[in-house]
Image (cartoon, rainbow, N blue to C red):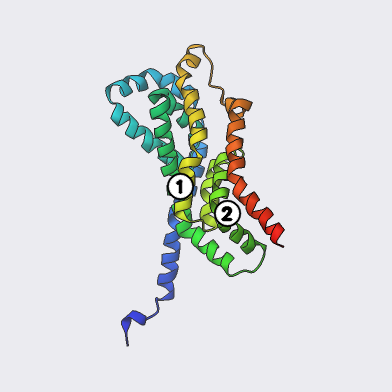
């Protein structure tokens, strides 16, 4: 008998299936632990208390500081730990607007890709396969998403009301193509990344006044307006496709 056609034993298949879910399970466990243990430590107060030491280390070892910053930010995003906004502002505080934005976008994108792949490898693959076997509303929604992946993914990145971890997990669970996810993640987080980095550039003066940074700046009309404009632009292809379809009916 040809050994290549021998079916894989059921226990082995179950073990393989469980292993596929392990990365996402680890991320969820670490996220819960981090939410409980780190929420009072990754704060602007911590940054204020350690800013002199951080600035001195940056001045002496800027490459090492940049690598450590990227690694820390990736962990925060990949494990959905508290402090992503603090990390983004810190990037501007330590590295300025241009380099800080580049480091923020790079680290946030890599962290998002890590959690996307972990979710898609396990639960995402299983859920997408189950949706494909159905004929109901869920499958139609999934098909609609696939027909408008770029627009939907850009919208999820540009609309501030969508939590960052949701924009990382949900696409993986419905089988979004990796290339589209990565592309829209990198470009879609640039506007918000610039704003947070910009806040960080002036953080030293804020600390000198004994104040904390005002993250509500993101909701000021001159800031949120252009971002929502980009979101509307991202939605335009879907609107055109919809009205063309209505016209053809």
Check the image and report above or below for 241 versus 193. Answer: below
Local SS, label 2: loop
Mark 2 vs mark 1, CA separation in Å? 14 Å
| Residue at point 48%, 25% (across, down) | 198
Q: Position of residue 246 (x, y in %)?
A: 71, 58
Q: Closest to the observer: 180 or 237?
A: 237
Labels 2 and 1 touching (C-beta < 8 A): no
Residue sitting at the far top: 209
Residue sitting at the far bottom: 1
Local SS, label 1: helix
Q: Earlier in the sequence, mark 2 or mark 1?
A: 2
* Disc 2 packing (10 Å; few <14; some 14–19; many ≥20): some
Check the image and report above or below for 207 versus 44. Answer: above
Q: Describe residue 144's horizontal placement relative to residue 23 as left or right.
A: right
Q: Position of residue 65 (x, y in %)?
A: 32, 29
Quadrant position of the C terminus in the picture: bottom right
| Residue at point 37%, 32% (across, down) | 69
Q: Name the residue under label 1.
A: 183
Q: Describe residue 152's horizontal placement relative to residue 44 as left or right.
A: right
Q: Mark 2 points at which residue?
A: 148
Q: Describe residue 59's horizontal placement relative to residue 36 as left or right.
A: left
| Residue at point 54%, 45% (across, down) | 154
Check the image and report above or below for 13 versus 117. Answer: below
> Which picture quadrant has residue 223?
top right
| Residue 79 shows in the view | no
Q: Closest to the observer: 199 or 165?
A: 199
| Residue 184 shows in the view | yes
């Amino acid at each position: 008998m040809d050994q290549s056609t021998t079916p894989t034993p059921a226990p082995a298949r179950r073990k393989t299936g469980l292993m596929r879910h392990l990365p996402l399970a680890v991320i969820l466990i670490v996220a819960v632990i981090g939410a409980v243990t780190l929420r009072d430590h990754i704060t602007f107060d911590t940054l204020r208390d350690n800013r002199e030491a951080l600035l001195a280390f940056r001045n002496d070892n800027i490459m090492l500081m940049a690598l450590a910053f990227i690694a820390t930010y990736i962990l925060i995003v990949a494990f959905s730990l508290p402090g992503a906004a603090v990390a983004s502002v810190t990037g501007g505080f330590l590295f300025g607007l241009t380099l800080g934005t580049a480091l923020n976008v790079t680290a946030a994108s890599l962290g998002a890709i890590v959690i996307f792949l972990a979710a898609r490898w396990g639960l995402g693959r299983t859920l997408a396969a189950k949706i494909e076997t159905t004929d109901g509303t869920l499958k139609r929604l999934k098909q609609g998403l696939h027909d408008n992946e770029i627009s939907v993914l850009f919208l999820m990145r540009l609309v501030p009301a969508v939590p960052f971890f949701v924009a990382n997990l949900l696409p993986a669970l419905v089988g979004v193509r990796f290339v589209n996810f990565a592309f829209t993640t990198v470009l879609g987080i640039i506007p918000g990344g610039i704003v947070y980095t910009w806040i960080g550039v002036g953080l030293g003066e804020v600390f000198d006044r004994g104040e904390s940074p005002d993250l509500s700046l993101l909701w000021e009309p001159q800031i949120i307006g252009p971002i929502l404009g980009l979101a509307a632009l991202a939605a335009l292809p879907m609107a055109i496709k919809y009205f063309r379809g209505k016209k053809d009916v």
